[in-house]
Image (cartoon, rainbow, N blue to C red):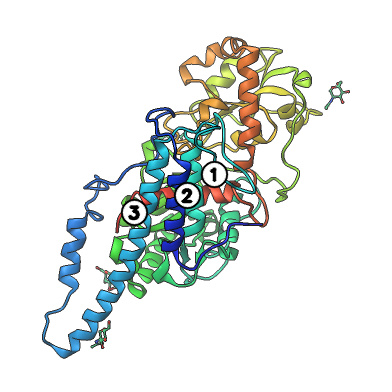
Amino acid sequence: MRNLNRSSSPNGVLLAMASLFVISAIVVSKGYYKEMSWFIIPTTPLMPWTDITTPSYMNQRKRKELPEMGSSDNSVLVNRTRHRDERLERLEADLATARALIREAMTKKLMSQTILPLEDTDYVPQGDIYKNPYAFHWSYLLMERLFKIFVYGEGEPPIFHNGPCKDIYSMEGMFLRFMETDTHFRTWDPEEAHVYFLPFSVVMIVQYLFHPIIRDKAVLKRTVVDYVHTISHKYRYWNRSLGADHFMLSCHDWGPRATRYVPQLYYNSIRVLCNANISEHFNPKKDASFPEINLKTGQIMGLTGGFPLSNRTILGFFAGGCHGRIRPALLQCWKDKDQDLRIYEYLPQGISYEEMLKKSKFCICPSGHEVASPRIVEAIYAECVPVLISQRYVLPFSDVLDWDSFSIKVSVSEIPNLKRILMGISEEQYLRLRKGVKMVQRHFVLNDPPKRYDVFHMIVHSIWLRRLNVRI
Ligand SMILES: *[C@@H]1O[C@H](CO)[C@@H](O)[C@H](O)[C@H]1NC(C)=O
Ligand SMILES: *[C@@H]1O[C@H](CO)[C@@H](O)[C@H](O)[C@H]1NC(C)=O
Ligand SMILES: *[C@@H]1O[C@H](CO)[C@@H](O)[C@H](O)[C@H]1NC(C)=O
Ligand SMILES: *[C@@H]1O[C@H](CO)[C@@H](O)[C@H](O)[C@H]1NC(C)=O
């Protein structure tokens, strides 16, 4: 499946990639591509909200850890500390080179005769759907060559190492399963890892420990606090970065809440969340947004595909419950009011939801209880252009994808004008959006086992970018 050979020496690979870069980079032209907002070049302090990763702080820590010279007992400790620091420094040096290469790629102009796209047997990212396809490709290949993830072995299923693979929270279980069985990114040696995964499932904690009548959320707190306590006492990695190179992942509504009980997890760690709500302290510099995918039967095959444009007879479609703040406005304005804009709270008997997605030009995706909505991926799968109505939502993979090239954003105040807005989109514009939807599909598709550039790899890539923004 992967044709890219891994070298045993990351430094050698980096050197080779760096020289390839020089060869391919014939023309340098700044500002050709759209502004890149996702890649933050580390400066000091790296993370303004905490000083844990600033070099000066780390130096202080190292100095404190070094025992007094002279005592024979301590010399072993000194040696071990040095050895460990050297390994970390090597990892950090590799990341620094990767950072520099990606940064360089961001300034390059990609034209067929001058800079050739990077070679890739499977796929070459190109086109409007990317903020910067060339830089993304570099970053992606570097991730494949270098990135190492350590999964803590502590904890027992069903709450750890396991999650739901069906229904609305299925991405939590799918990611856990893929990570547990991964052979490419996963390492069993924590010393060579760039990030450390805390493999708990919020969905499983709620399902197995949360009492539906007593409704005591303390179980969530206890489980997460105990887990971080265990790994931070057993291993030295948590304390080394105060959690900044650790990540958790959850699609559950309570995913963000689950991290709140451990301040370092909340403020320092990489939180990979479906509910990427800025108002709930989702921080796009360190946290990553990933898509909610509703696997209604647990089946991941045959979910994509829609009717040709000539058969898309419905302008816009939505069917769903009246909850949250946005949907009541949508339903009040449009429910059962218009033949072109089919807005339902409950689908009438005999009408297939999947069929409606396939024969609509636009699929309306308003936030419900939470900012994320599985409708976005349903629309992308059905080749229906998503109409996003949400507030304070950080869209999945928006660090590399240009959502404006394959979706429409409508603000809540414009809901009364929805029909006019959609009618105002020219045929040409629509065809461009639809082409974008088809192109971006591969990044939202699940494969078992995962395939390059699919949704699993996009999530790992988001984590890779967040890790590049930190220096331990
Ligand atoms: C410290 O490490 C060096 C090699 O790096 C080794 O030769 C030496 O014996 C070590 N000292 C102790 C006390 O372990
Ligand atoms: C990490 O820090 C905590 C509290 O500061 C301490 O109790 C624990 O022993 C440390 N862990 C390790 C492995 O040193
Ligand atoms: C398009 O619609 C026509 C008439 O409803 C139908 O016969 C045809 O099978 C449809 N084509 C596709 C690809 O769905
Ligand atoms: C986002 O978070 C804020 C603050 O908790 C909340 O008021 C709002 O309802 C959330 N948005 C959605 C769609 O849930």
Is residue 325 toward the left or the right of residue 387 in the image?
A: left
Q: Which residue is mark 1?
A: 118
Give the crowd class for mark 2: few <14, some 14-19, many >=20 residues within 10 Å: few
**Quick one: 400 or 371, which is closer to the camera?**
400
Between 193 and 420, which is closer to the camera in this rendering?
A: 193
Q: Does 84 sit left or right of 284 as displayed?
A: left
Cβ of mark 2 under 8 Å from ligand 1: the answer is no
Say whether residue 284 is visible.
no
Residue behind mark 3 = 96
x, y (%) of residue 327? Answer: 55, 26
Q: Which quadrant is the N terminus positioned in?
A: bottom right
Category of crowding for the residue at label 1, using alpha-carbon neighbours closer than 10 angstroms: few (below 14), some (14–19), many (at least 20): some
Disc 1 vs disc 3: which is toward the camera?
1
Q: Amino acid at mark 1?
A: Leu
Please give the name of the residue rendered at 62% of the width and 22% of the height, measured from the top-left corner: 432
Ligand 2 image position (quadrant): bottom left
Is disc 1 in contact with disc 2, using a CB cutoff of under 8 Å?
yes
* x and y percentages locating residue 101 in the rendered image: 40, 47
Q: Of marks 1 and 2, which one's residue comes earlier in the chain?
A: 2
Report the Cα–Cα distance between label 1 and label 3.
Answer: 21 Å
**Separation (CA) of disc 3 from disc 2:** 17 Å
Residue 20, which numbered label? 2
Q: Residues within 10 Å of mark 3 (few under 14, many from 20)?
A: some
For mark 2, give the secondary structure: helix
For the residues labelled 1 and 2, the Cα–Cα distance comes to 9 Å
Residue type at numbered disc 3: Ala
Q: Amino acid at mark 2?
A: Leu
Q: Are marks 1 and 3 in contact (CB under 8 Å)?
A: no
